[in-house]
Amino acid sequence: MTLLRPQNVAAASVRTAGGTAVARRPTHGRWRLPGGVVVLAGWIGLCVAASPVAATAGPRATELRPLERSILVEMNDLRRQRGLVPLRFSASLAAAARHHSTEMANRGYFRHTSASGEAFGRRLARFYPMGDHRYWSVGENLLWSSVELNGAAALDLWLDSPNHREIMLNPRWLEVGVGAVYAHATGVYGGRDVTIVTADFGVRR
């Protein structure tokens, strides 16, 4: 069997400085939707050496476990409706997603790259390693909103973006983890009370 190289994809507008990004698709965009909702879109491949985020630590974010469960239920219902296999909950991917949502809230930034400059694929690999598997692939969707969200509303936002929809409904994923937090966040959030959601998708085989 041919050893397949790891892959990672994300719906995001990612800028790199002092490094390179291999674009899988040359589409990048930002949507600011009514009611204070922001989503980013554009596929990326393996990405390295993004510049660190200059941000200061803010108040601690509060995890929203009921919202996470609601998103998982709605997502699997949607996948079943589209004839896709429902995704298994992954504690590892959920830990990665919660870590990233919390860091974005506490440090006031919104992007797949970590505050340290670590690319999202490398971040996910720390929580969800390839191990002895021959194939490893991950993807990620993000959103933040200054209005209250439930699972159905979060999915609607991703469905309205072709790149987010394509990631969420990709048939190759087997597992998913969601991290949702609430915080009074500064930086790009402008001192608003916001909900930030990260959904991390993965497959290892």
Image (cartoon, grey):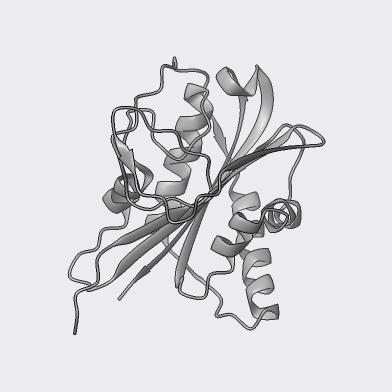
Q: Position of residue 183 (x, y in %)?
A: 61, 28
Which quarter of the figure has residue 53?
top left
* Residue placed most toward the observer, 167 or 203: 167
Picture residue at 66% right of the left edge, 54% below the top: 158
**In the picture shown, does residue 122 fall above or below 133?**
above
Position above or below: 20 against 95 = above
| Residue 40 sits above or below residue 74 on the image | above
Residue at image coords 49%, 25%:
106
> What residue lies at 42% left-to-right and 40% top-to-bottom?
99
Could you tell me which residue is drawn at 56 percent across and 18 percent down?
A: 187
* On-image quarter of the C terminus: bottom left
Q: Is residue 146 left or right of residue 69?
A: right
**Residue sitting farthest toward the right:** 34
**Percent from the top left, x then y, of residue 182?**
62, 34
**Image position of 104 (left or right of 4):** right
Which image quadrant: the N terminus? bottom left
x then y, percent, for residue 172: 46, 74
Please state the total of marks drawn on the protein image. 0
**Observer-nearest residue: 83 or 77?**
83
Q: Nearer the viewer, residue 24 or 170?
A: 24
